[in-house]
Image (cartoon, rainbow, N blue to C red):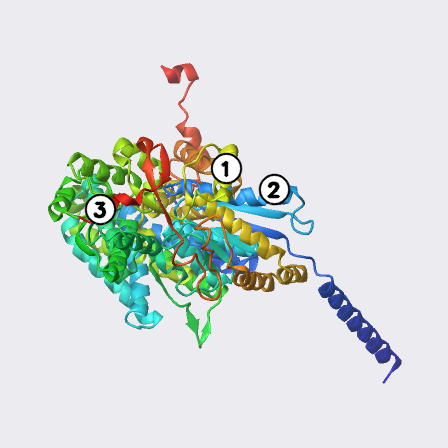
Amino acid sequence: MTANSPPRPTLAPVIFILVLGALLPFLLQSGFHMRLAMLIWIYAILSMGFNLLYGYTGQISLGQPAFYAIGAYGFAMLQVKLGWGPVPSFIGTLVVCAVVAVLIGLPLLRLRTHYLAMATLAFMLIQHGIANRWIGFTGGQSGIAIVPLQWGGETIGRTGLYFVVLGMAAAVLLLHDFLVRSHVGRAMQAIRDDETAAAALGVHVVKYKLRILVLSAVIAGVAGVCFTLTSLRVDPSLSEFHVLVSMLTIVVVGGLGTRFGPILGSVVVVLLPQVLTGFGELETIVYGAFILVFLLFLPHGLSSLIERRDFLAAFKARKPAGTGKEAAE
Amino acid sequence: MTRTTQTKTLLAGTASTLAALLIGATAAYAEPLPLKICHIDDRSGSAADTGIEGLNGLKMVLDPLNKAGGINGRQIELVTYDTKTDPQLAATFSTRCAEDDKALLMIGASPGAVAASMVTVANQLKMPLYVLASATPNLTDNPAYQFRFGPKVTQDSLAVADALAEAGIKKVAIINNSVPFGITGAESAVNALKPKGIEVLTQQTYDVAATDVAPQIINVMQADPEVILVYPYPADGARVVRTIRQMGLTQPVIMPRVGAMKAFRDLAAETGNGVLIPSSVDMSRPEVKKLFDDYAALHGPLAVSPSPAQGHDAGTLAVQVLSDPEVQKAIDGGDLQVARDAIVAATKRLGRFQGLQGRADSPYDLTDDHHGPADAGFFVFIEVAGNGSELVPADLSKLTAK
């Protein structure tokens, strides 16, 4: 490392986030606040998978909500229809997500950019259609309800459930951070920037793309399981457009291809609608305006404020040198 | 025992007695709970009209009551949340209502998926919920804290089957879109018609976004039914009816729920004339007509729609329940869960009541394990007239067997 090299990222911020997460139950005042905290972690898990796939590897898959729903449905159906326990159901669900990802990844990853986006969006629509229309199997729009998670014959309370979700989020966050800081992360970024150049450098592009797709699908499945544990039911809305929009908003607000963007974006996307309820009829307009402001003034998301220690210097550097007239010319 | 120890013991005993007295006094003079209700429903998104009309109907009960001094001098506070047809948001708002707002009762939940998620929260948090428009059949299959004011879609189908059987109809065709309302509606129709000996000659399904439904209509034409049953959304419903009439089919068309919606009537225009609709709103009842006149005066003209009546009925029962002496006692006691349980018990006790929905002789039955409108005799038939501008009492004589 030369004297001018940027400092190597450390685990310190990850540990700080997790410690803060562990302290939250002692700081929050009601079960509703705990639910919001769980939703933040659930969306963060979902978006971390998307961040690996799109933010770091450049593969724009709009099918992530489908894997989120498959995770949720798998976990619920293995328990309700096959009578499996929560742990085998969890493992079985992740296997299902991985297998489905391999099956769709093999043909779809030949596609790039908006073609890949459209194909994966079609996959989401198919999954949503099945969840909605195969009523005898999926419960249709009413979905499927599960019993609350239990430990030693006792139902786990909301605080206990929070720590279960936090544990899963911690595992995903550590994996996400490990990958982006390792040679795998550099290979992913090389693929994102130029697949041909990456291949010329010895990166096995197809292998990496498929592995990351499978991993992001499994991570989305973990998010789906967490959602089922929290809400005690699954329904087709898990793969509706609003989930996709929330996920895209998280990466815009938090910062695409950043270490902590998914978490910061999730905080905003989960809490903002609750804060804006006071605006009544104008709520949706204010929400939209807020996102526009982010796009205009923080195109790299909230994460850019934290991860770029030289933010102020960079902001000054963005200003054109000389007078406004000269800049205009 | 030394003198110091004696003094300490005396002080400790005095402190304990004072603490016990203080706790007792606090319990005896517990602050009464605020009369807070949450309205959680769509006010934007695909079911916005339903949610807004239901809220307006609810306010038509609560606002005059509050102006007149409320219940025993205490106002009812209404907290509103817009669910945007998002079940996850609805679940979060329901939790907020139960745990942060500490409300006594939730009212709303019109779209089926929103209602399903709110029912889960209501039962998890032991919070009474009055479901308004949702037609999903199984919402009240295992009723605990949830009560419904909107009939199940299966009840519409039973009303249709009864009317067809009475007219001697033996052969029908069904056309439905492929969204849950269409699928569930068609399925419930098949189940209701079969026991009446009415044969479904063909059931045609189309995509809700399909611009051309001629293939499905040709199949219906070839089946040659006596009546055509349609389960659409408004825009595709208009396309179906236009195609039916453009292809020369003259059979009566029955379109539960959607046929009454303004969007359908506007788009179908002259081809919508004569479309029959089983309706839970009987405009021949003077009190129902007055509700719609009052509604028009406050919010502008509105065609016959069950939503204001559902909101009004839910509000009326909520006021009766909150005024109930047992509920008042629980509210004065200051224990939120005891008050909520008292509301559930009072809803069951007072739940057989004549609302503005249904026929004059067909009260709600929210008692015991029923928790919803009466299963039979709840519907009247209306039909579209005036190129979509009116809904008038139906002429059922057009339902004649071939």
The reply to whether callout 1 and callout 3 are in contact (CB within 8 Å) is no
Q: CA distance from mark 1 to mark 3?
A: 33 Å
Circle 1 residue: B295
Compared to A323, does A137 lie above or below?
below
Q: Position of residue B55 (x, y in %)?
A: 49, 43
Separation of marks 1 and 2 at Cα, in angstroms: 13 Å
Residue depth check, mark 1 versus mark 3: number of the one nearer the observer: 3
* Quadrant of res B337: bottom right
Of residues B92 and B313, the one nearer the viewer is: B313
Which residue in the protein does label 3 denote? B228
Amino acid on which the number 3 mark rests in the picture: Ile
The label shown at residue A106 is none
Q: Earlier in the sequence, mark 2 or mark 3?
A: 2
Identity of the amino acid at label 1? Answer: Tyr
Observer-nearest of B20 and A138: A138
- Viewer-closest of B59 and A173: B59
The chain containing the residue under callout 1 comes to B
Mark 2 closeness class: few <14, some 14–19, many ≥20 residues within 10 Å = few
Q: Regarding mark 1 in the picture, which secondary structure is present there?
A: helix
